[in-house]
Image (tube, rainbow, N blue to C red):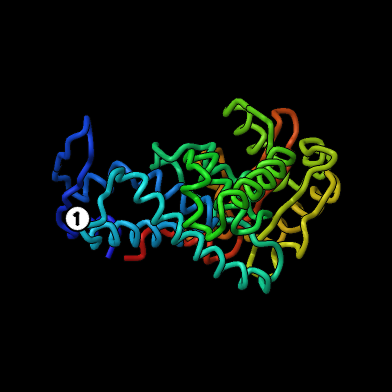
Amino acid sequence: MTMRKSIKQAGKLRDTTVADGATRSDEITLERAFADLRPAMFALAYRITGSRADAEEIVQDAFVRLHNSSPAEAVRSLKAYLTTITARLSFNRLRDQRARRETYIGEWLPEPLLTEDEPRVRAEDVSFALMTLLERLSPQERVVFVLRSAFDFSFEEIVPIVGRDAVTCRKLYSRARAHVLEERPRFAVDRKRHQALLRSFNDAARGGDTAKLASLLAADVVFHGDDGGRGFAPKKPVVGNLAVARFVIAVTRQQPADMSVDEIELNGAPGLVLRVGKRPIVAMMIETDGEHIKSVFAIANPEKLAVFLGDPS
């Protein structure tokens, strides 16, 4: 059952709000709540877990829990209530994931996100470079940082979600913020320029032009790859323009000659999906300052490419 269908079947909820000192009951449908709040709840769950599939499940679970909540639970703010539920579920999922990621073969990268059909998911909330950076935070730091910076939660409101007192939450946020500010990309690049560099990267790689490809890359460029241990990606990031150029061209030469390339919006920015027939084999994104490519992200783990196959149902 899809999330949208489950929400449609959930019926109606009486939402109690307080305004001007009087209690007023407004009947709203969960379908409307789904349409209005899903993008923000999905972005929250995705930013915390780094997984599109997990985020979809968490948002569905949050709305089901809302439907099943007791009327005695006075929902003063529907968005705040759902945000709290979503954050708790995401935090629990992230802690469960961390144990598995410690045994993951190679570098673990977030799942790429199709954003062309999600106009209300803000690009800055789900940029792939930022998502990769958030992976370096502890689960508690990550949840506190996202809730404080993106949803303006007070530290007191975050306390029951992460199970730490307000003073500790403030320290967690300060530590996370300092780390993000130190390493967060500071580039505001014209979209057409970003796309042009990505196309040039692809053309040089498929043409086997090492010198051309190296010239597109910053001297300290970093290649991040994730194939789930299937042999495509390096176990550790590759650093340096010549090393990255040689690696990318060597891997590209191993691909079938009939490989096709789709230009698509991923995580709010231009991206590429490489296919053999209809089967996606890798999704690629870059981070650029407008002059050179600073980072390359390649996701080849089939489980993380399932979205490019369409809805299997």
| Residue 46 in the image, given as x and y percentages of width and height | 49, 52
The quadrant in which the C terminus is found is bottom left
Q: Quick one: label 1, few (<14), some, or many (20+) residues within 10 Å?
A: some
What residue do we see at 15% from left, 39% from top? 24
270 to 300, vertically: above or below: above
Q: Which residue is mark 1?
A: 8
78 left or right of 274 in image: left
Total labels drawn: 1
Q: Amino acid at mark 1?
A: Lys
139 to 74, vertically: above or below: below
| Residue 5 in the image, given as x and y percentages of width and height | 23, 58
| Front position in the image: 3 or 36 | 36
Indicate the secondary structure of the residue bearing disc 1: helix
87 left or right of 110 in image: left
What residue do we see at 57% from left, 43% from top? 271
Can residue 276 be seen here? The reply is no
22 left or right of 185 in image: left
